[in-house]
Each structure stands twice: as structure tokens, then as C-alpha cells.
Image (spheres, rainbow, N blue to C red):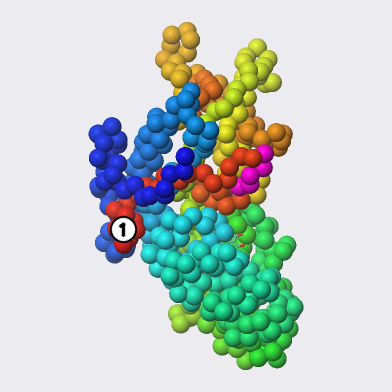
Amino acid sequence: MVMAPSVITTEDICVNDNFYHCPKDPKLTLDTDHGVNAVSLPRASAAAKQLVLDVLRKRVADIDVATCEPGEEDAFYVADLGEVYRQHLRWKLNMSRVKPFYAVKCNPDPQILRLMAKLGNGFDCASKAEIDLVLKMGVDPSRIIYAQPCKTRSYLRYAAEKGVKQMTFDNADELYKIKADFPDAELYLRILTDDSDSLCRLSMKFGASLESARQLLELARELELKVVGVSFHVGSGAEDPNAFLKAVQDARYVFDQAAEVGFDLHTLDVGGGFCDETFEKFAAVVSNAVDVYFPPHIRIIAEPGRYYVASAFTLAAHVIARRTVRDPADPSRDAYMLYLNDGVYGNFSNIIFDHQHPVAQILTSSDDGNSSDGSCEPRAIDYSIWGPTCDGIDMISQRITLPGLVDVGDWLYFENMGAYTRCSATRFNGFPDNHDVIYISSEAGASALLEH
Ligand SMILES: Cc1ncc(COP(=O)(O)O)c(C=O)c1O
């Protein structure tokens, strides 16, 4: 059963008395001078978590695994668009000078893209298909940056046809391709960064060294191409905010070189790599660095992906099988291997491609959670958790302790599943890659934007 991706707002959820009533206060608005402060954001976020849990429980309560059709018990997401909205406000509060171009690759969900467009954000696209997704929403091509330094030639011509002018480059061959296929393009020289402290390193693949920058700028000049800015990416899931400081300093150096070569650059693109947990720290470093090194008339943009969407998606998966084993750490105890109907070839692809460690929580369990000796202490039981395919690498958790006995037919849920999950899922072993998403909005501001 594939549900239409309709948006459930707080109001919908209040219709039924069985549902949690999401408090109307705090209500956040885009008016950052009045509506939001650093305290109200986490408060709203805590209330929203309960709303997500209620929607997850409502959905699984409607599924009878003893009688349902194949696939009705498939894993599914609840996506809280209000969480994306709060992240946007947080961005505006902490980095008002930097305009976000959402990295579509991270999660090209249509409702997320719609909300990004309504919020006035730009888009970082890496392929023809991503460009199409954005243009089909009616977004002006000037709001897109084709941020892939090594482009497919036919895609380059497609970008030219559609008027997607902004794009990155980092090597001489790319400049010759651009000269042939899109000489009017507006080019950003992507420079190398020190991404040694990042979760997903990108600089081993992309980025021009500072030593080669001048030569590339001179070649662009010779070819009569238009270089308009510098871009960098400190690595996805960056850990060290000083990587941003160093990259901004390097970008300043390249801006000065470009001026010597005869270009008047107007934009710095500070890339992605921002994370939920460390955002304020990174934002302070970036804001300060761009103010120190770039005068106000220089436009600053960024390409955040995971920052916006990771925490907005919660995944629920069904326990399809269980095996009782001796606990390897304490052979006197039972432990359990749980098999879910989703794994690393599916939505847990972030374990392989994004070095994530999703944490299971119990959504429904037939166990009351109490000890068999009658005490009310919750039982701590150890599990390993596996996906549904025949492959041994399809493991979600090597070892996790949960407060109760999980059985076949129970449901687990995983928070923070919005980044690099669905978009890199496969159909290996015939399992589906197009799981349902139930959209909710825990923020009236987001609901209002999406209504029109
Ligand atoms: C060019 C580019 N921009 C932006 C991003 C988004 O990075 P993140 O999701 O860490 O913000 C990526 C991720 O790989 C990227 O390659």
C-alpha cells in the first residue's frame, strides 16, 4: 500500500482525541526579530518529537501483520517539515549573511524541495535529474548551482539549455568542456580543503590546490570564460570548525589572485558539512571568518544538506524474525538477533555510505518491560540488529541494549534518518526502495507556507 504523500498538519492530528495535541505555543515564525529565540527552538523541537511518536504509533496500530497484504508492514518514515523549518530559523539566527543552497543529493524528497523553495533557499544540484526536480517546481534557474566539478557533457549542454548558469570547476579539462558546451556559464573555482576531520572526505576527489589556482584562472581568462566566485567543501559531517576558517582564508587568497588575473569575483560558496549537533559553533566561526575576510558586497552562499533534513525524518521498521543466542559477553544469558524488514541495502544505506550509527528504539512491544521477578525495573536485554537481505554485511547494530523483550511483529524506530538514507537505497534481493513517507508539520509557519 503506497500512501499519497499528503501533509498532516498539527490541526489534522488534533481531530482525533486519541492523538497528542501538539501545543500551539511556542509557535515560531520567520520574523526572526520577534518570533524566535535560542530557547524557543529546542522547546518546540521536544514537543514535536512527541507528535512524531504519536503518528508512528497510529500508523502501526492500523497494520495487522497476521492478515495484511504483502508490503503493508514495510518500513516507513514520518517526516516533520516543521523540523526543517526550525532548522531554517536557526540558520537565519546564526548565519544571516550566508544564503543556503540546499544540497538536493542529501534527500531529494519532493515535499522537502517544495519547502526549501518556499523558504526562498537556492539549490545545489549535481546531475540533470536533480536540476529537473528543482526546475519542475517552477524555481528560477538562477537559484540553482550545478555544484559538480566534473560534469557529464550532455548534462552541461542541458544546463545551458535550461539557463542554469552557476557551476563549479576544479581542473583545466573541465574549462575546455565548458568553453565548448556553455561558454556563458558563471564559474566557481572549487578549491581543496583540509577535510581530514570529516566523516565523509571529499577533497581526495575534488578541489584545485592553491598552487594550481592561478593557472586555472589564467586559462579561464584566455578562454574568455566568466569566473564569478570561489567554492569549497570542508567534507560532509565536518568535525573541526577551524577547517572553515582555513578554507575562508584560502578563498580570500584565490579572490586576490583572480583580481590580479582580471576577474571581479562576487560570490563565495562555503559548501556543506554543517551538522545539527555542532551547528552554532561552526556558524560562529564561519560568520566571523567571512566578515573578517570578505567585505559586505561579496555574496556568501552555502550548500547545506544533512543540517536541514537529518533530524526531520524518523524511520519505523518491523521485526520480521528473531533468533535466540547465547550472549557472547555473558554465556549464562540469552541475547537476541533481530531481523528487520529494512537494512543497509535499503534506508540504512547511511551506515555504509555516510558512516552513521542509527540507534534503535522500541516503538511497539508486546512485552510490558518489567522483570520476571515482579520488580518494576525495566529489563535490559542485548540485541544485534540485522537487515532482511541474504548478505552478512547487512547489519544495523552489532550490539544494542533495549529496555524490554522485542519479539517478531514488534516495531522499532530510528531518529535522525533524513540524510543520505532513502536516496541511496537499492532494490537488492527484491526489497523495495520506495518507502512511504507520512508528512507532518509541527510548526504552524511551515504548514502555512506549504498550504499555498
Ligand atoms: C558539493 C557538495 N555540496 C554539498 C554537500 C552537502 O554536504 P552536507 O550534507 O554535509 O551538508 C555535498 C555532500 O557530499 C557535496 O558534495
Q: Quadrant of residue 171?
A: bottom right
Residue pictured at 38% horizontal, 56% vertical: 85
The location of residue 29, given as percent across then percent down, is 29, 59
* Quarter the C terminus occupies: bottom left
The location of residue 218, given as percent across then percent down, is 70, 87
| Magenta span contains residue 1 | no
Toward the top, the furthest residue is: 373
- Bounds of the magenta segment: 425-429
Of residues 407 and 46, the one nearer the viewer is 407
Q: On the rendered structure, is 141 left or right of 384? A: left
In the rendered image of this protein, does residue 356 appear above or below residue 107? above
Disc 1 residue type? Glu
Does residue 444 appear in the picture of this structure?
A: yes
The location of residue 96, given as percent across then percent down, is 41, 68
In the rendered image of this protein, does residue 142 appear above or below residue 65? below
In the rendered image of this protein, does residue 160 appear above or below residue 193? below
Q: Quadrant of residue 324?
A: top right
* Residue at disc 1, CB closer than 8 Å to ligand 1: no
Residue pictured at 25% horizontal, 40% vertical: 15
Residue pictured at 39% horizontal, 40% vertical: 52
Residue identified by numbered label 1: 451
The location of residue 215, given as percent across then percent down, is 73, 83
